[in-house]
Image (tube, rainbow, N blue to C red):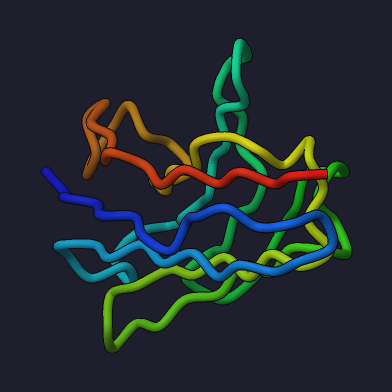
Amino acid sequence: QVQLVESGGGLVQAGGSLRLSCAASISIFSINAMGWYRQAPGKQREMIATITSGGRTNYADSVKGRFTISGDNAKNTVYLQMNSLKPEDTGVYYCNTDKPTVWPSFGSWGQGTQVTVSS
C-alpha cells in the first residue's frame, strides 16, 4: 500500500502562490496517473488536477490556468503549483492516484495539507 505525505500548505492572501508537494513511498512512474484533490469546508473531496505517467495533465475548470501539476519520477514526488489563489481555493489538499480505491492506495489517504486563502 502506497504511503503519501503532502506538504507545503499554509495561509496566503488572495492573489498569492503556494507550491504543494506529495511524496510517495513507491515509484510514481509505475502508477497510471496521480492527482491532487481538494476538500473545501463542508464539501466533498474533488479531484482538481491529474498527471499521467507519460506527463499528460488535466485540470478542473475551477483551477485551469492557475494551477500546474508536475511530477519528479526520481524523487517519487508530485507537485501542485498554485498561482492567483482565491478564497474559494481554501481547503485541505490531498494527493492520490486517479483511482484511489484500488492498487496501490486501496482506499488509503494521507493527512493532507491545509491551504487557507484570505481575502
* Above-or-below relation of 81 to 102: below
* Above-or-below relation of 96 to 77: above
The quarter holding residue 111 reads top left
What is the total number of numbered labels drawn onto the structure image?
A: 0
| Image point (85%, 42%), residue name | 62
* Viewer-proximal residue among 99 and 62: 62
Residue 114: give x, y in percent of width and height. 47, 43
Residue 10: give x, y in percent of width and height. 50, 55
* Viewer-proximal residue among 91 and 29: 91
Q: In the visual, does 75 lie left or right of 114?
A: left
Residue 5: give x, y in percent of width and height. 25, 54
The quarter holding residue 85 reads bottom right
The quarter holding residue 8 reads bottom left
| Image point (34%, 55%), residue name | 6
* Above-or-below relation of 93 to 106: below
* Viewer-proximal residue among 76 and 18: 18
Residue 40: give x, y in percent of width and height. 62, 26
Q: In the visual, does 106 lie left or right of 101?
A: left
| Image point (57%, 65%), residue name | 80
| Image point (28%, 35%), residue name | 109
Furthest residue toward top: 42
